[in-house]
Every structure is written in structure tokens, then in C-alpha cells.
Image (spheres, rainbow, N blue to C red):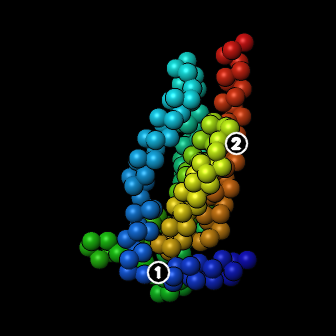
Amino acid sequence: MDQLDRSLLLWLNQQHSAWLDPVMWQISQPVTWIWVYVLLAVLIIKRFRPVQWFWVLLSFGLLIFLCDFTVTHCIKNVVQRLRPSHDPSLQPLLHLITDANGNPYRGGRFGFFSSHASNHMGIATLFILWMRPLKTYWIIALISWATMIAYSRVYLGVHYPSDVLAGMVYGALAAILVHFIFRKALKSTRS
């Protein structure tokens, strides 16, 4: 399995081009997506009544805690799987993007699993659950958005495909758990 992960990473990472490098770099930057976060926030505010906003904010905070803090500060530090960009046997084989000073972007030391993937799949899944029923094109757009961000991490050589796949599954499961808690909290405040 590990060899398949390495081979797939190298193949995907080598599909680079001069015009795609800056695009993938931007896709990977959370600041690029501020307009999406604002749009989703506006739609959520319209969906829920002001008395429910406390639970919405608390639920979103719990999701970010599970998908970002827990992944970054607990899981990565326990598993301690080197990112491909920090693996000496892979470094010469990877195409890494360089910054303005010519330094290659490597990300943090450990990469299992991707918090970019878990954060964005978590946000997409929670939004889908909150906004049900939702048009199919919204679901496709949100899942595609999260998948594109996850793929950018492999393209940049800072995650194995299994890192982003595990992150996406974890993010979706975390969102389902948060949504379950959210529904219970709303039900208990109505009683």
C-alpha cells in the first residue's frame, strides 16, 4: 500500500506545468476562499433563526476544533508520518513550488493526515447537512471544491494521496457527528 501511495503521489505531482503551479498554490491558500466562506455564512444566517445562531457558531467551532486543531496538534504528532516533501528519498523526485525567495514550499514536518482536506470536506459536509434539501448542483460544487483543495496538496508534493483521502473521510465524519450534536442541542432547547 505504501508503494502504491508513493507511486501515485509521484505521478500526480509530476503532472505539473508552469501555468498550473501558481493556480494550485492559490487553491491551497485558505485566504483564496474567503468569498466562499462569506457566501456560506450568509446562506447559513438566512437559513437559521437568530435564536439558533449560538448553536450554529458552537457547532462550527466544534467542527474546526475536530478538523483542524485535533488533526494538526494531535493526530499528526502521534502518527509522525513525514510529508513527502520532508522524506529524503522523495525530495529529489518531487516538483516543489518555490516562494519569492526561491525556497521550496515543504509544509510542516508531518502530514498524516491533511488538515486542509479535513477542514474543507468538513465544512462542505456540514453545510450540505444544514441546508437540506439542497439542489444536486450545490452538493457537487461543494464536494468538488473540497476535493480540488485536497488534490492541490498532492500536486504541491506536501501530502500523499492517502493523507488527503483520510482527511476527507475524517472531515465528513466529523461533520456528521457535529450535525448530530447540533440537532440534539436544537431539540433540547425547544423542549
Q: Nearer the viewer, residue 105 or 20?
A: 20
Judge whether residue 148 can be spotted in this image.
yes
Up-down relation of residue 112 to residue 59 (above or below): below
Local SS, label 1: loop
Local SS, label 2: helix
At a point 66% along the width and 77% down the height, the residue shown is: 5
- Could you tell me residue 148's position as x and y percent? 54, 63
Which residue, given by chain and number where applicable, does mark 2 sit on? 176
Name which residue type carries label 2: Ile
- Could you tell me residue 182's position as x and y percent? 66, 30
User: What count of labels does the image hold?
Assistant: 2
**Left or right of 158: which side holds 21?**
left
Which residue, given by chain and number where applicable, does mark 1 sit on? 16
Q: Nearer the viewer, residue 11 or 132?
A: 132
Q: For the residue carrying disc 2, how many other residues have a C-alpha within 10 Å: few (<14), some (14-19), or many (20+)?
A: some
**Left or right of 118: which side holds 95?**
left
- Could you tell me residue 126's position as x and y percent? 62, 42
Judge whether residue 74 can be spotted in this image.
no
Q: For the residue carrying disc 1, how many other residues have a C-alpha within 10 Å: few (<14), some (14-19), or many (20+)?
A: some
Q: How far apart are labels 1 and 2 at the CA level?
A: 35 Å
Q: Are marks 1 and 2 in contact (CB under 8 Å)?
A: no
Q: Quadrant of residue 89?
A: bottom right
Up-down relation of residue 107 to residue 117 (above or below): below
Up-down relation of residue 30 to residue 57 (above or below): below
At a point 51% along the width and 83% down the height, the residue shown is: 14
Name which residue type carries label 1: His
Quadrant in the picture for the C terminus: top right
Q: Nearer the viewer, residue 158 or 189?
A: 189
Quadrant in the picture for the N terminus: bottom right
At a point 38% along the width and 52% down the height, the residue shown is: 31
Could you tell which of marks 1 and 2 lies nearer the N-terminus?
1
At a point 54% along the width and 75% down the height, the residue shown is: 84
